[in-house]
Image (cartoon, rainbow, N blue to C red):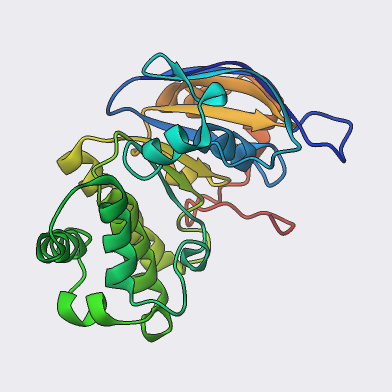
Amino acid sequence: MLHCQRLTVNYASVTKPALCEIDFEMGPGEVVGILGESGCGKTTLALSILGLLPAAVRVAGSILFHEQDLLHLSESRLRSIRGAQISLIHQEPGLSLSPVTRVGEQISEVLRAHRSMKRILREQECKAMLGKVQLGDVDRIYNAYPHQLSGGELHRVAIAQALICRPELVICDEPTSSLDVTIQAEILSLLRELKAKLGMAMIFITHNPALLAGFADRVLVMYDGRVVEEGRVAQVFRRPLHSYTKELLQLVTPESGRLAFHHEN
């Protein structure tokens, strides 16, 4: 379904590549974790797939999505793919939600951009999706502004917005990092359940190995713009080969199963 080949990205103001010859592929319904600390190139990889890199960036290689090279499609063609076939769940819902528009209208707008439907049917679809992401009182949520919702509710709304067109691939960019432990576990459980129900493939970007265990099928460990190790999650976590992977796994505390970074990521 998706195949990155020798993907290299250079930002104009930086001499060292943000991504250097990234190679990986994934099939329908597969969950691939992208693991690494801040600055390793994880988000640049996501933006490359979505066609959202700044215009001045130099990109080499290819990103094949169903044999189409996303790096060479027109902006109008990319817009038809984004949201419909490939979608993004941001780290912060505020990045994808306008503060001055009711959340139901914002979800409906994604549907309107990609599907020919009457307004009443779009509203029904949106409310049904709000129910699927386990939000109660969907009428209140649908008519609320973002500032009227809790952090956990906002994350569920962002997930509903990303999934409303039933995309084949969902890119989750650190989707739980700003949440407390309890809500983080709830969102991860929700994503696991939705993946099972809807069958979409996922790229799950994180700095926390514990979030991938029992969730992702495979993991790519990134360091300094390169993939330094990849394989089945259980295999990589049980017998890490690269020293950087070993360091990441050593930061998982046995008590909580969570990373204990000594600096801010």
For the residue pair 178 and 148, the one nearer the viewer reads as 148
Residue 223 screen position, x and y as percent: 70, 31
Residue 189 visible within the image: no
When the figure is inspected, residue 129 is found, relative to residue 45, above or below; the finding is below
Q: Residue at x 50, y 68 (%)?
A: 94
- In the picture, measured across the screen, residue 213 lies left or right of residue 165, that is right
Count of labels in the image: 0
For the residue pair 76 and 254, the one nearer the viewer reads as 76
For the residue pair 111 and 152, the one nearer the viewer reads as 111
Residue 216 lies in what quarter of the image? top left
Q: Quadrant of the C terminus?
A: bottom right
- In the picture, measured across the screen, residue 165 lies left or right of residue 22, that is left
When the figure is inspected, residue 12 is found, relative to residue 136, above or below; the finding is above
Q: Residue at x 43, y 41 (%)?
A: 79
Q: Residue at x 33, y 20 (%)?
A: 27
Q: Quadrant of the N terminus?
A: top left
Residue 196 screen position, x and y as percent: 19, 39
